[in-house]
Structure formats: structure tokens, C-alpha cells
């Protein structure tokens, strides 16, 4: 796959159209990429007193792909490593991507709410996600994941205190975490319905295109994130709990 080449003569609009992730760089420097974005990058940078080459480097960095080319066998990973992966990859991604997508939804609707009245619900869904997902992740990071690591350590070393640990510290993983994940799943399903599975209408403005692209990216990450927890991490921890309790009885 050939990578889009950015240079000083590239138009701002073309750069964002080829890779929506570059929009964050333009937002950072307050460069309009929607209505006044047809001018060359060099002109836009000079108007803001910016070094074009430095901006080009930053734009190129924003386009670097982080998607793995080979499938990862998550089921074979050590449970501690999997928990750390979820935290450092998916949680840290959401820390930035969720408020970023929320901001784009607001900007898009502020400009085109009357033109696309059916998309108004997006704002409410994003507000719910902004309210519910961050504390959910903190709960996992501060309570659930450390507990899973304790269970894994006890299971691997056949510790004598294992049954006491489980009976006194066990958290309602199946009920609480799966319930919250189910809520996120329903929210994603509704976003797909509202956006026509992120289908961009003809003649959609750049902000509209970026908003849908960011929502689509967020959707894919959350699906993978929830899959790793619901179908691999949590079931393995629960199986360890059961085995430890049986061995202690």
C-alpha cells in the first residue's frame, strides 16, 4: 500500500482527506482544514508563523500506522501481560481518543445540526460514554487488574492463602464488568445505526468525514478491547479462582 506523501505544496484539505489523523496537528496550530483548506501547506504555515518543515514532520508522525500486520494470539499470553497490554494499549488509547471523538462530534453538530438532525443523538451518546467509560477504566486499573494479577500469582505458585484471598477480595467481574461492557456495546450499536455504519454522505464536509472516521476507529478499538476482557482475560481469571478454591477445599 503506497503511503500518501506530504510536502510543502500539498493542500491542507488533501492532507486531511488522505489521512484524518493529521487533523489533530492542524487543530493544534489552528489551521483551518475545512473551509479554507485548499491553500498549500506552506502558505498556511507562513500565515501562522510556523516552520513548514517542522509541521510536515509532525504530520508524517501522525500518519504512522500502529496496526499489527500479523494476527496476535492473545489467548496464549500470560494473563499479567494481557492485563498490561489492555491497560497500556486500549486504556491509554481511550484516554485520548474518546475526548477527541467527543470534541469532533460537538464541532460537527455545531456546524451541521440543522442539515443532519438525525445525528443529534450522537452528542448524547458521547456524553454518556465520556461520563461512564473513564471511571470504568480506573476501576479496572485500580481494582480488577491488580486482583487478577494476585490470583494469577497465587495460582502459579499454589499459594496457601489463595482461598482466603478469593473469598475476601473477589470482585463481581461477571456482573459488574460485563454489565458495563454490555452498555458500551449497546451504545456502539446505536452509533452504527445513526451513522449508517459510518457511511459518509456525498459532498460531506471535512469535519463530517473526520468525525465519522474517528467514531469508526473508536468503535473498532472498543470491540477489540471488550473482546480481550470478556472472552479471554476475565474467563481465565475466573477459571483460576475456581481451581484454587477446589484445591483448597
Image: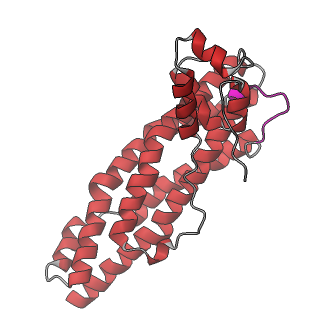
Could you tell me if residue 190 is visible in this image?
Answer: yes
Viewer-proximal residue, 108 or 175?
108
Q: Quadrant of the C terminus?
A: bottom left
Q: Relative to residue 55, is residue 39 depicted above or below?
A: above
Residue at 61% x, 30% y: name it. Answer: 23
Q: Relative to residue 161, is residue 226 depicted above or below?
A: above
Could you tell me if residue 249 is visible in this image?
Answer: no
How many numbered discs? Answer: 0
Q: Relative to residue 57, is residue 77 depicted above or below?
A: below
Picture coordinates of residue 159, whole percent (x, y)? 17, 82
> What is the quadrant of residue 170 in the picture?
bottom left
Residue at 41% x, 69% y: name it. Answer: 234
33 lies left or right of 99: right
> What is the quadrant of residue 233 in the picture?
bottom left
Picture coordinates of residue 35, whole percent (x, y)? 72, 16
Q: Residue furthest left?
A: 160
168 lies left or right of 47: left
Viewer-proximal residue, 74 or 191?
74
Q: Main secondary structure of the magenta part?
A: loop
Viewer-proximal residue, 161 or 9?
9
Q: Which residues are magenta?
A: 199-207
Residue at 53% x, 63% y: name it. Answer: 227
Viewer-proximal residue, 202 or 143?
202
Picture coordinates of residue 226, whole percent (x, y)? 51, 59
> What is the quadrant of residue 164 in the picture?
bottom left
Q: Relative to residue 180, is residue 24 depicted above or below?
A: above
The colour style of the image is secondary structure
Amino acid at each position: 500500500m503506497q503511503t500518501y506523501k506530504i510536502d510543502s505544496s500539498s493542500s491542507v484539505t488533501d492532507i486531511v482527506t488522505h489521512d484524518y489523523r493529521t487533523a489533530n496537528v492542524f487543530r493544534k496550530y489552528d489551521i483551518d482544514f475545512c473551509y479554507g483548506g485548499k491553500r498549500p501547506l506552506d502558505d498556511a504555515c507562513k500565515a501562522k508563523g510556523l516552520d513548514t518543515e517542522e509541521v510536515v514532520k509532525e504530520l508524517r508522525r501522525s500518519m504512522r500506522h500502529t496496526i499489527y500486520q500479523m494476527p496476535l494470539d492473545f489467548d496464549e499470553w500470560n494473563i499479567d501481560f494481557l492485563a498490561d497490554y489492555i491497560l497500556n494499549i486500549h486504556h491509554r488509547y481511550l484516554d485520548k481518543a474518546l475526548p477527541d471523538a467527543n470534541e469532533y462530534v460537538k464541532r460537527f453538530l455545531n456546524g451541521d445540526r440543522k442539515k443532519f438532525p438525525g445525528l443529534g443523538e450522537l452528542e448524547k451518546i458521547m456524553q454518556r460514554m465520556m461520563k461512564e467509560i473513564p471511571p470504568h477504566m480506573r476501576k479496572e486499573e485500580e481494582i480488577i487488574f491488580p486482583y487478577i494479577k494476585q490470583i494469577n500469582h497465587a495460582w502459579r505458585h499454589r499459594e496457601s492463602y489463595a482461598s482466603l484471598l478469593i473469598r475476601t477480595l473477589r470482585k463481581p467481574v461477571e456482573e459488574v464488568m460485563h454489565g458495563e461492557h454490555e452498555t458500551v456495546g449497546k451504545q456502539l450499536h446505536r452509533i452504527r445505526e445513526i451513522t449508517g455504519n459510518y457511511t459518509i454522505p456525498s459532498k460531506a464536509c471535512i469535519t463530517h468525514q473526520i468525525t465519522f472516521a474517528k467514531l469508526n476507529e473508536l468503535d473498532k478499538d472498543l470491540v477489540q478491547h471488550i473482546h480481550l476482557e470478556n472472552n479471554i482475560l476475565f474467563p481465565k481469571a475466573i477459571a483460576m479462582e475456581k481451581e484454587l478454591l477446589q484445591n483448597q477445599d
